Amino acid sequence: MARDILLAVGGYTQPGSPDLALINWNGRQGEICHALHTGTNPSFLIQKGKTLYAGHELVDCVKITSYRIKESALEQKGEITLLGAGLCHLSDADTCLVGSCWQSGDFFAVDYTLQKELWRMCLPGAKKDVAHAHCSVLMGQELLCCDMGSDCIACYDLSAEVPQLLWVKVFAPNTGPRQIIPVDNAKFVLICENSNSVMLCKKSKAGCFCLYTLSLAQLGSGWPGGACMVESETIAVSVRGVPKIAIIRVEADSLRLHRIQPLCGDWVRMITFLSDKTLLAVQQKMNIVEAVPPKIGAKFDTVALEFAAPAFVLQVTEKEDDNNEHK
């Protein structure tokens, strides 16, 4: 019998309900094994080694908390509070954590022990009144950042102590680049919320160009949000406002809509692909995490996991600390 998968779920704080929990997933449903009520919207999660980092989405500050995962429970390790507002994304840049703040419009980095801020910046093409920093991702030694409000992405060299700008790409007004999904060392898929589309892009040291744009209008009118790789060269994209997920094949220089997966709810905050090939969709307004079976036509119970105002789900492990983790 396969072992249960351990999940971490975070969300927007609701009175009397947990907003951060570890879940045992048995292949069909989940059961909470440890839950916390932080009271501070732990809406984004990332793991490094045995440490789980929670990014708290607050209007008056930036807050990150670290937890050690031990025996299917969470033990708090550290915490840092910084200037800024609306922390919505964390990424591992190999030597530090990088945060994106949609309300204050800036990106910042902190060390893994959450002792100090290392740097902070806005994208060169960002417009001060509409800046909406939303995502960063490490591709090799380069950090890609997207600003949804300013319709731009930027690439930085991280080999120096402070990020060095390589290039900025400005898209058409109301494109809304929200999330970056790396395909290989050069290509990535850009999820564009405001234009209801996804782009296949290719980068180099000199710049970035779009190879192909795929409209998601055939799914309905909505706002693409969560996306993830589900297999090699295949991605899944959810569209808020539409009870469907698009399964898209990444080809040499194009994107092809492979199939459309119906869902029970229409406000998916994010999606994640598990090692057992189940796709989990975080249904924020329905207060559930919905499971999509790995086989077309297979049926799961509609409610895979009840959780008040969920925002993020992540498969985690209790593996040994890696060499980069501070113990």
Image (cartoon, rainbow, N blue to C red):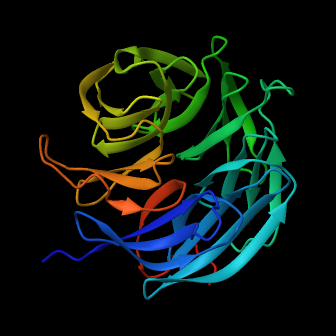
Report the residue at 60% width, 77% height from top.
67
Residue 117, image x, y percentages = 82, 61
Q: Which residue is outermost to the bottom?
A: 71
Residue 176, image x, y percentages = 62, 23
- Looking at the image, residue 171 sits to the left or right of residue 297; the answer is right
Is residue 43 shown above or below 266? Answer: below
Viewer-side residue, 18 vs 66:
18
Is residue 125 shown above or below 108? Answer: above
If the image is split into quadrants, where does the C terminus sit? bottom right
- Looking at the image, residue 235 sits to the left or right of residue 148; the answer is left
Q: Picture quarter containing residue 14?
A: bottom right
Q: Which residue is outermost to the front?
A: 16
Is residue 55 shown above or below 243? Answer: below
Residue 177, image x, y percentages = 59, 27
Report the residue at 56% width, 69% height from top.
20
If the image is split into quadrants, where does the N terminus sit? bottom left
- Looking at the image, residue 183 sits to the left or right of residue 321; the answer is left
Report the residue at 78% width, 40% height from top.
103
- Report if residue 293 is visible in the image: yes
How many marks do you count on the picture? Answer: 0
Viewer-side residue, 33 vs 94:
33
- Report if residue 187 is visible in the image: no
Is residue 121 shown above or below 243? Answer: below
Residue 249, image x, y percentages = 27, 29
Viewer-side residue, 69 vs 286:
286
